[in-house]
Each structure stands twice: as structure tokens, then as C-alpha cells.
Image (cartoon, rainbow, N blue to C red):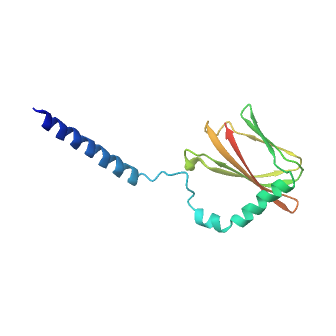
Amino acid sequence: MNWGLKIVLGLGAFIIFIVSAGIYMVTKNTDTLEDEDYYEKSLSYDEVYQRKQNLLDDHARPTVNVRNDTLYITFSKPHNRGDLIFKRPSDSMLDITLPFVTEGQDYRLPVSSFTKGSWRLEISWEQGETLYTSDHNLYL
């Protein structure tokens, strides 16, 4: 076997590897960085912008802490109602939406059943007549 044959076989193996990797990436659509309904969300972004502006104007950003497998959220005022949206950057199948209601300023949620790792928490709530949205990065 001479050098020419070895080079041709090496290039052939490399081409087969590149083609098979390309086919694998095209058939596995696991791009979790893009929302499934991004177009619908973009149409309602004015509402999201207003919610975030209300958060800044009223200094209503809640504090979020994780201690001993419990999530603690402290709001600026009592009587809150809304949704906690947990998004897992590595796997969108693990995303969870939980409704909540508070009488006081504090809310507690056990998170021991959640998959360990990095999460993105979006808190969307109303306090009286005012709507708010706040984003937090967590490691559970």
C-alpha cells in the first residue's frame, strides 16, 4: 500500500464523517434556544415591555433565594398573584409553569423534585392593578 492510497482512504473517511455529522444535525432538531412560538411572543412584546417598565418604575423587583431545596421569593408588597415559569436551557421538555398566590410578601416553593442544574425563572404577576415581569437565573 502506497502513500497515495492512504491519503485517498483518509480523505474518504473524513468526507463520510462530515456528511454523517451533517445528516445527524439536520435530523435532530434540538435547538432549545429558540422558542416554539417566538412569532406570537414578538407580537405581544409591548405588553412585556410595559410589565418590565412597571418593575423598574415601582422598584418592585422580588428577591429570589434558594436554601435547603426551597425557593424563597420576597415581593415588595403583599397580595400577589401570578405564574412562576421555570425554563431549563438544556432541555425544554423540563419547563414548568406554576401559578401562585400570596397573602403576605413571601412565597416558598420546595424544589427538591426539580432536576439539578441551571434554570431560568420568569416571574409574571400582578400586584393590585399593576402587572410585572421579572427574570432570574437560578442554580438548583
- Taking depth in this image into account, of 86 and 132 the one nearest to the observer is 132
Residue drawn at x 69%, y 64% is 45
Extreme residue toward the left, this view? 1
Residue drawn at x 60%, y 45% is 88
Q: Quadrant location of residue 139?
A: top right
Residue drawn at x 64%, y 43% is 119
Image position, residue 83 (x, y; %): 74, 54
Image position, residue 52 (x, y; %): 77, 57
Extreme residue toward the front, this view? 4
Image position, residue 31 (x, y; %): 50, 52
Say whether residue 105 is left or right of residue 15. right
Image position, residue 65 (x, y; %): 77, 37
From the image, which quarter does the N terminus lie in? top left
- Taking depth in this image into account, of 26 and 126 the one nearest to the observer is 26
Residue drawn at x 88%, y 48% is 76
Say whether residue 107 is left or right of residue 38. right
